[in-house]
Amino acid sequence: MTALISAELLRLRTTRSVWLLLGAAQVLIVVGISGVMLDRDDAGSPAVQQAAVAHIGLVSLFTLVLGIMAVAGEYRHRTITDTYLTVPRRGRVVAAKLVVSTGAGLVFGLVTALFALVVSAVWLAGRGFSLDAGAGGLWLTIAGGVAWNAAFAALGVGVGALITNQIGAIAAALAWLALVEGLVARLVGDAGQWLPFALGSALDRLPTAVDGPPQWLAGLALTGYAAVFVLAGAATTLRRDVT
């Protein structure tokens, strides 16, 4: 298992798209925080600062793609057959990808959190304010955003194992988050707060999630989604012909 994890880490470090995703995530942070700071006159208030750093959670869109690529990318580049011939126990391969991708999602979240704090501090200083580092809500939002990144990376591994076409898997996942979940939420009413993106918003304490479940419960439910998708993807992988 250690060798599998090492191989996955090597693949992750040497894949250019991973670094492009990390760079794009920081661009999102700059744009998002700048939008909040320019739109509000009370930039020094804890609520505004919390809304600014909450963009950390939105980076989970990139970690979701990262998790999908970890599995579906091998099918796209036709390396999956060699992988399974080298390690016939496919469950171990999926497990290694899950561990490494979740860890990468965590790193994405931590790097983004640090960058978000720096960008926020620079904006606040420019407007005559300072970052309220003693605000508990700020750190809860940061912790939730980092956890959201890790959870969506794990979820991506499950999606990639279920839908092995990389472009199809990414398109389906992003379509769900951008359009389908909103439509489903309208149909199911209050139950919509238990859908994946809504749970992530509650975990990240986004202002749009004020009526969602408490942060700890949102994290638990999102972990449950990831577990279901990974188990379903692993079960499908065991039966799939990859030749």
Image (cartoon, helix red, strand yellow):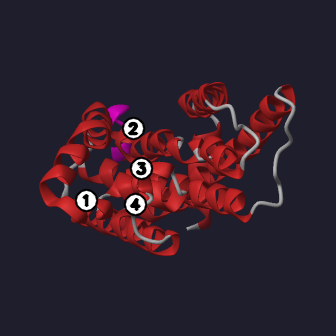
Front residue of 95/202: it is 202
Q: Sort mark 2 into few (<14), some (14-19) or many (20+) by Cα contacts within 10 Å.
A: some
Q: Give the mark nearer the N terminus: 1 vs 4.
A: 1
Disc 1 target residue: 192
Q: Secondary structure at mark 4?
A: helix
Q: Is residue 145 magenta?
A: no
Disc 4 target residue: 199
Q: Quadrant of residue 87?
A: bottom left
Instruction: Return the x and y of residue 202 as percentages of the image width and height.
Output: 46, 60
Q: Give the mark nearer the N terminus: 2 vs 3.
A: 2
Q: Which mark is residue 83?
A: 3
Q: Give the mark nearer the N terminus: 2 vs 4.
A: 2
Q: CA distance from mark 1 to mark 3?
A: 39 Å
Q: Give the mark nearer the N terminus: 1 vs 3.
A: 3
Disc 2 target residue: 73
Q: Secondary structure at mark 3?
A: helix
